[in-house]
Image (cartoon, rainbow, N blue to C red):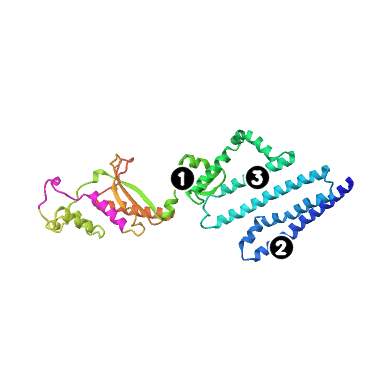
Amino acid sequence: MPIENEYVNLAFLLSAIAFLFLAIYAAFVPLLKRWAKKTPNTFNMLLVERHVASRLLQILPATAFSTTTPRILNQSGWLFELCSRVSNIWYTLLSFAIACSMLDVVEHLNGINERTMKRPLHGIFQAVKVALFCLAAIFIVSQVTDKSPVIIFSALGAMATVLMLIFKDSILGVVSGVQINISDLLRKGDWIEIERHHADGTVMDITLTSVKVRNWDNTISVIPAYDLITNSFRNWRGMQDSGVRRIKRAMFIDQKCIRFLTPEEIANLSKIEILAPYLNAKAHEIVGEESKAGLLGVASGTEDPDMLNTRHLTNIGTFRAYCTAYLRSNKYVAQDMTLMTRQLEPTPQGLPLEIYAFTNTTVWEDYEGIQSDIFDHLIAALPEFGLELYQYGNGFRA
């Protein structure tokens, strides 16, 4: 076949393929979009939006090009050899594009599935795409250089050390992403705290090499994925899943205010409904039934001049019992969790009286409101027990 005829035939072929491309994107793809919108199955629309359908249609011009060139070109000429390599490269790129589109569809379905939507699979999908890209690149290089892919793989093996240095973060990120996913260490939407990176907020995305965290001040922290495997971090998911959140805060009581209660004070405090059972129980425990009336201030009698020879109620102990009773009566405090009021080791700033309980909500705003209401009430109730908070810095007590 004359060389001039080959050029003419190839020009007609390329024109036909260009027309076929135009028909695909000007007619077929819009028709597919309209059809997908009318169908109730969202999967059809997803195939169109993620370019799976359009890239599958590109197989038609690629096939037309590869099957027609042997018929219109001299198979022993350089032009046919060039078209053959172009055809192989075309199929390679098209296969890579279709595979990436299919992965995008699977990733989208994973993102809307309730069971898997929070699993950190984005990095794994990226790793698969990178692997496919590397395979496609090796095959394309083999076509351009006319070398076997095995030879290129052998050459890459010799460059493995250099490649590991160049792609160190990517390799570590892939391994870390797999470990995070298998161990379920982290999910999208988790609240995590990493002090060394000053990160404290919600996980926005988990990619191949990094984890993106939106902090509570709306700043963004980007943390290497492998750093979460090699170092420790705090994940608040357990608290969010449990439905309760801990209150652990202490009031520092001025130790100069701690003393025994008088019968009159006990009688006044016994009028508090939630505290009365405690005082009645202590009355039986300390002085028995016969002296109960004297302890409660109902009947007067001779008092022991040496207070240390007998047991007496203290204002701090009674207030501690009141704190526990108040928490027991609070509907916003989880009653099936640990609930107590305890004294900690005395400090120069006073005697710490710690509230340890759990709210029945994990919503931050509600939690802070419940915690503040509890301590507002308890601090306001301190004077009724003859107690005061220790306050230093101004030379007086509050």
Q: Which mark is residue 268?
A: none
Residue at 30% from the left image edge and 51% from the top image edge:
340
Structural distance between the alpha carbons of marks 2 and 3: 31 Å
**Residue 319 falls left or right of residue 194:** left
Badge 3 density bin: few <14, some 14–19, many ≥20, Cα 10 Å: some
Q: Which residue was labeled with disc 2?
A: 31
**Main SS, magenta residues:** helix
Structural distance between the alpha carbons of marks 1 and 2: 49 Å
Q: Nearer the viewer, mark 2 or mark 3?
A: 3
Residue at 46% from the left image edge and 45% from the top image edge:
193
Query: Which one is nearer the viewer's eye here, 310 or 31?
Result: 31
Badge 2 density bin: few <14, some 14–19, many ≥20, Cα 10 Å: few
Q: Is 314 inside the magenta-drawn segment?
A: yes
Of callouts 1 and 2, the N-terminal one: 2
Q: Vertically, is 169 above or below 102?
A: above
Query: Which one is nearer the viewer's eye here, 85 or 346?
Result: 85
Structural distance between the alpha carbons of marks 3 and 1: 35 Å
Bounds of the magenta segment:
302-328
Q: Which residue was labeled with disc 3?
A: 133
Q: Which residue was labeled with disc 1?
A: 193
